[in-house]
Image (cartoon, grey):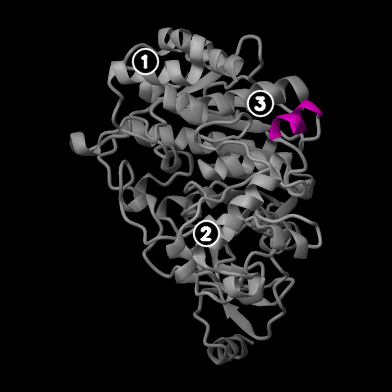
Amino acid sequence: MKKILCLLCFALNLAAQDVIIKTSKGSIAGVFNPSTKVEKFLGIPFAKPPVGDLRWKAPAPVEYWTGIKAAKAFGPSPMQAKPAPFAFWSSEFLIPESPISEDCLYLNVWAPRSNKGKKAVLVYIYGGGFRSGGAACPIYDGENMAQKDIIFVSINYRVGIFGFLAHPELSAEAPYGASGNYALLDMIAGLKWVKENIALFGGDPNQVTIAGQSAGAFAVNFLCASPLAKGLFQGAIAESGASMLPSPLRPAITKTQAENNGLEWATKLGAKSLAELRAMSAEAIQKAGGNASPYSDGYVLPVAMPDIYAKGLQNDVPILVGWNSEDRLSSKAAEPEVFKATLDKRFGSRGAEVLAAYGPNGSLDLGRDESFGVQVHTWAKTQNLRGKAPVYVYNFNRAVPGYDESTRFGAFHTGEVPYAYANLHTVNRPFEPVDKVLSQKMSSYWVNFTKTGNPNGAGLEVWPTFNSTDQKVQILDKVIETKELPTRKALELLENIN
């Protein structure tokens, strides 16, 4: 019998430790790592390539294939500008330079090899401002999380103009009468794949948590609000992102405005029809740029985000949300005189209140709070008041170690990701023993939440639920402790002004 199996493996050109799974669309071959006891499957297609006539359409079901498809390398990252380190982000925080392609709808699965019941599933959604990013980024590796007895999935989605172009003709041709938000539809298609297939990998399709950081966290917020995602997940983790209030980072626009923006973009490009736009190369489209982003289209997001929660229409699941003490998109503070003038212009008679709350040198902290803090805080409060599921809030305040002043940016935007997913080994920083302890505890919080909707567990500092009255949050730093939200007064001022 062993000889027959060996001959069969040889005939299929499979390595001794390959693992074959028959998915709903065809068989795939992944790899088993005997040292970690984790099975890894990379580059699994979950939709047809969104190219040609499928460009700027909702993801179409992938076709069946025959034979065994190798699932041992990441699929291409979505079409975007060539990645290069900038600001706070070194190469570990970026996707590989290649492959990058419009053909990008692939996902990845890390599964622990164990027969002890169905495993909870964490589905990770990357950040990148909805303009860049991809699941192949080193800090999103899922092997160490799988060793903690969950299944880790990461999904690709379209970004930039490919993921969000709204246009009157696109809305007219769509059976649901809207356009844009293709990236969110990609995520929903990925979650449907998980619902249909994850049991084959040992996962529980009824215990799925979605998680994301930055744009990925905004996406998690949108998915929590979308009726199209109902029943596809039972918990949500959002790191540094939500879209509960209009902000300089993501202003609210109407469907008409989004379509007009797309029409103007196409006109500047010289395209007179959708056929001409779809005939253009992906490289030419990318070079043309464009500033499309998620919006309330009447379909994926039926009404404005605040209204969805005000009416109790959200997917009411436990949420674990937070942001970082240096969650900034700039590293240089405005001069006090410039800052004051900006506040007076933006907030009018209330500019003095904002100045008093942040101080003359507070432009960076205001930027952090407007872009991330006030959004996440509003989401937490709204879910607590309008929903039934519990809320857990954190502040990540550990200054990520650097080798010198050029690599020290405090608890910078994205800095918490390697801690939360047990991936410090992927980042070239002079980490200390306290960082390894923090990572072990954070990743355990995240795993516990994935399994039960509650981050608490043995060996961890107690993390209380958040409520709108006392607003207790978990401070994640060298010392983990519970405190009243340190920036509460400033955030409530911003909420009141909005």
Give percent across and percent down for residue 64.
72, 79
> Closer to the observer: label 3 or label 2?
3
Which of the 4 image quarters holds residue 367? Answer: top left
Residue 383 showing in the rendered view: yes
Residue ID for mark 1: 340
Type of amino acid under label 1: Lys
Secondary structure, magenta segment, majority class: helix
Q: Secondary structure at mark 2?
A: loop
Residue ID for mark 3: 391
How far apart, in angstroms, are the residues tagged by discs 3 and 2?
33 Å
The answer to whether the residue labelled 1 contacts the one labelled 3, judged by CB atoms less than 8 Å apart, is no
> Closer to the observer: label 1 or label 3?
1
Whether the magenta-drawn stretch holds residue 307 is answered as yes
Residue at 53% in and 13% down: 488
Type of amino acid under label 3: Val
Whether the magenta-drawn stretch holds residue 244 is answered as no
How far apart, in angstroms, are the residues tagged by discs 1 and 2?
57 Å
* Count of labels in the image: 3
Quadrant including the C terminus? top right
* Earlier sequence position, callout 1 versus callout 3: 1
Residue ID for mark 2: 37
Residue at 71% in and 29% down: 306
The magenta region covers 305-311
Quadrant including the N terminus? bottom right
